[in-house]
Image (cartoon, helix red, strand yellow):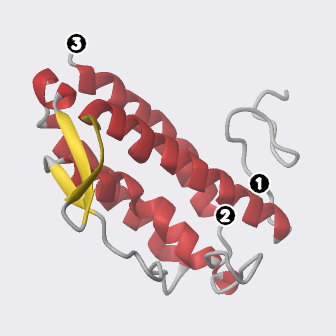
Amino acid sequence: MRIVDSILAELDREADTTRRVLARVPNEKLNWKPHPKSMSLGQLSHHVATTPGGVATIVAKTEFEVIDFGNQPSVASASELIPTLERSLAEAKSILNGFDDSTMMANWKLTRAGKELFSAPRVGIIRSIMLNHWYHHRGQLSVYLRLLDVPVPSIYGPSADENPFAA
């Protein structure tokens, strides 16, 4: 089994959960923010939908120069979220499937203004930035849903609104 195979399996499992969360995003609240410093619901949802493909594109290179991210893009309609996620997942899988074990273990580095900020094996970057970072923002999104009184789907077990284990 290749190192990347376990990442791809996890990506598939977590994609189902992400679809459930994104499907709950109310179109009429895309501009809503829980705090002035927060991303809007539309921006956060777009970020969640695009993370796998975006990160895979970045880690396909041997290094990445940090840019000022500025304002995150949003979606014009909540109906864009699932198709955006599907494109992002397809892009991530296509890129990751091209990685052999030596590519996964090769060092990848992050730079800013030509200076190295950190370096780590690519598999670690994929684990922390593609997956863990994705889960973090999906968790934020579930809090946004709760604050908007939108039923929160089951993520890793029952939510206050949905229990997949109930009869």
Please indicate whether residue 138 sits to the left or right of residue 14 in the image: right
| Type of amino acid under label 3 | Met
Q: Determine which quarter of the picture holds residue 24.
A: bottom right
Q: In the rendered image of this protein, does residue 40 appear above or below residue 142?
A: below
Which mark is nearer the camera, 3 or 1?
3
Query: If you read the primary sequence from the N terminus, does the residue marked by circle 1 or circle 2 appear first?
Result: 2
- Are the residues tagged 1 and 2 within 8 Å (C-beta)? yes
At 82% from the left edge and 72% from the top edge, which residue is drawn? Answer: 148
Query: If you read the primary sequence from the N terminus, does the residue marked by circle 3 or circle 1 appear first?
Result: 3
Which mark is nearer the camera, 3 or 2?
3
Q: Tell me if I can see residue 28 in this picture.
A: yes
At 26% from the left edge and 31% from the top edge, which residue is drawn? Answer: 121
The CA span between labels 3 and 1 is 36 Å
Q: Which mark is residue 152?
A: 1
Q: Which mark is residue 24?
A: 2
At 80% from the left edge and 58% from the top edge, which residue is drawn? Answer: 151
Give the crowd class for mark 1: few <14, some 14-19, many >=20 residues within 10 Å: many
In the picture of the structure, the residue carrying the numbered disc 3 is: 1
The CA span between labels 3 and 2 is 36 Å
